[in-house]
Image (cartoon, grey):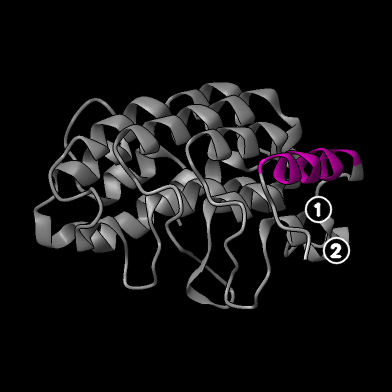
């Protein structure tokens, strides 16, 4: 799997000096974009890997804007997601929630918030159903942000109009995720610390989350 912009650009046979997978995908013919979008999603999610430094993470925002500026990559076009439901919004929020230390890393949280703003500016629906282990249409971005235990991300999504009372296919709301035992919050068995999750829960309740 590609771990860098350069590797992904080479795989796309993108012949430019700028090694940027977002631009590489945008330059592909329309009928090739969906399969390459899955690879772009994987690289975007990897922005939150513990080995990523501030410089490599900082390169991504501009590339994301370039990709979204190309016709065919915006909802509700089928080109905006893979057959598995993977999309740029999914890659962003799922990647952020998957690496527990990302929430505690300032430059990763800053990138998350900047990239989220970019996606929302391009009118990506804030309550889009995103895939998880249960299927292709499950959690919303707010649910993923709650899993990450990031009050700033929860604030940003609520401000963007996210519905605090939507339920996933199992009937779980964002508030329920915030109150779940840490071991249930991430596939790696970690989870956000109790103080952050308590703050997230308070924000959800203050924004109208139902208690029953």
Residue 191 in the image, given as x and y percentages of width and height: 81, 53
The residue sitting at 61% across, 58% down in the picture is: 165
Describe the element under mark 2 as helix, strand or loop.
Answer: helix
- Give the vertical position of 63 relative to 76 (above or below): above
Describe the element under mark 1 as helix, strand or loop.
Answer: loop
Which residue is disc 2 drawn over?
183
The residue sitting at 25% across, 38% down in the picture is: 67
Mark linked to residue 191: 1
Magenta residues span 195-207
- Would residue 53 be visible to someone looking at this image? no
Are discs 1 and 2 less than 8 Å apart at CB? yes
As for residue 52 lying within the magenta part, the answer is: no
The residue sitting at 61% across, 30% down in the picture is: 108
Residue 10 in the image, given as x and y percentages of width and height: 28, 44
The quadrant the C terminus occupies is bottom right
- Give the vertical position of 53 relative to 8 (above or below): above
State how far apart marks 1 and 2 are (Cα): 6 Å
């Amino acid at each position: 799997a590609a771990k860098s912009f350069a590797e992904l650009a080479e795989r796309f046979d993108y012949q430019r000096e700028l090694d940027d997978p977002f631009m590489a995908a945008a330059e592909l013919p329309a009928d090739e974009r969906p399969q390459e979008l899955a690879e772009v999603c994987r690289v975007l999610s990897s922005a939150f890997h513990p080995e990523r430094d501030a410089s490599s993470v900082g390169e991504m925002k501009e590339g994301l804007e370039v990709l979204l500026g190309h016709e065919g990559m915006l909802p509700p076009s089928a080109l905006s997601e893979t057959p598995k439901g993977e999309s740029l919004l999914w890659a962003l929020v799922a990647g952020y929630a998957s690496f527990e230390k990302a929430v505690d890393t300032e430059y990763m949280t800053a990138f998350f918030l900047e990239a989220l703003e970019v996606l929302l500016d391009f009118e990506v629906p804030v309550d889009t159903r995103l895939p998880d282990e249960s299927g292709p249409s499950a959690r919303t971005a707010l649910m993923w942000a709650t899993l990450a235990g990031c009050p700033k991300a929860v604030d940003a999504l609520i401000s963007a109009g996210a519905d605090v009372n939507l339920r996933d296919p199992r009937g779980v709301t964002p508030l329920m995720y915030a109150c779940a035992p840490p071991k249930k919050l991430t596939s790696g068995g970690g989870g956000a610390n109790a103080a952050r999750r308590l703050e997230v829960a308070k924000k959800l309740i203050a924004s109208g989350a139902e208690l029953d």
